[in-house]
Image (cartoon, helix red, strand yellow):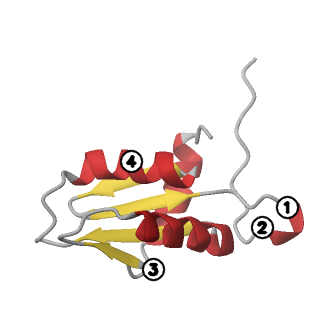
Amino acid sequence: MNLTSKQRAYLKSLAMKLDPSFNVGKESLTPGVAEAIREALEANELVKIGVLKNCADDPKELALVIAERTGSTLVQVIGKKMIFYKEAKKKEDQKIVLPKAKKAE
């Protein structure tokens, strides 16, 4: 999913209030952690993840892998914090309503 800058800014503002739901540490991204993140995204649509100091992986590279494995959209990486968004499959399950994207003329 491609986000507009306005949608990305909106998601960042929502994520500021969140504490990291998951922390990736020494063992990096295990299949179990990836599955737990995917489930959290399906339930909440927006997830913040922290990378601990003992994790040897680069946060930006790790964020791309997480986005790929969870089918989510990477919103932002700042330092060792990452924000991911995944739109709910059903309209009635949506918790976040993104600002509308302007149509190109």
Residue 19 pos. (x, y %)? 39, 82
Residue positioned most to the top: 105
Does residue 3 sit above or below 70 in this rendering?
above
Read off the residue under disc 2: 94
Please name which of the two marks, 3 or 4, marks the residue nearer to the observer.
4
Badges 1 and 3: C-beta atoms under 8 Å apart? no
Read off the residue under disc 1: 90
Compared across the picture, whether 52 is left or right of 74 comes to left
- Callout 2: SS: loop
Q: Name which quarter of the figure residue 101 lies in.
A: top right
Please name which of the two marks, 2 or 1, marks the residue nearer to the observer.
1
Badges 2 and 1: C-beta atoms under 8 Å apart? yes
Please name which of the two marks, 1 or 3, marks the residue nearer to the observer.
1
Q: As shown in the figure, which amino acid type bears the numbered disc 2?
A: Gln
Please name which of the two marks, 2 or 4, marks the residue nearer to the observer.
4
- Residue at x-position 18% and y-position 54%: 57
- Callout 1: SS: loop
- Callout 3: SS: loop
Q: CA distance from mark 1 to mark 3?
A: 25 Å
Residue 11 in view here: yes
Read off the residue under disc 4: 65
Task: Check disc 2: other Cα within 10 Å, few if <14, some if 14-19, many if 20+.
Answer: some
Q: Earlier in the sequence, mark 4 or mark 1?
A: 4
Please name which of the two marks, 4 or 1, marks the residue nearer to the observer.
4
- Residue at x-position 42% and y-position 73%: 16
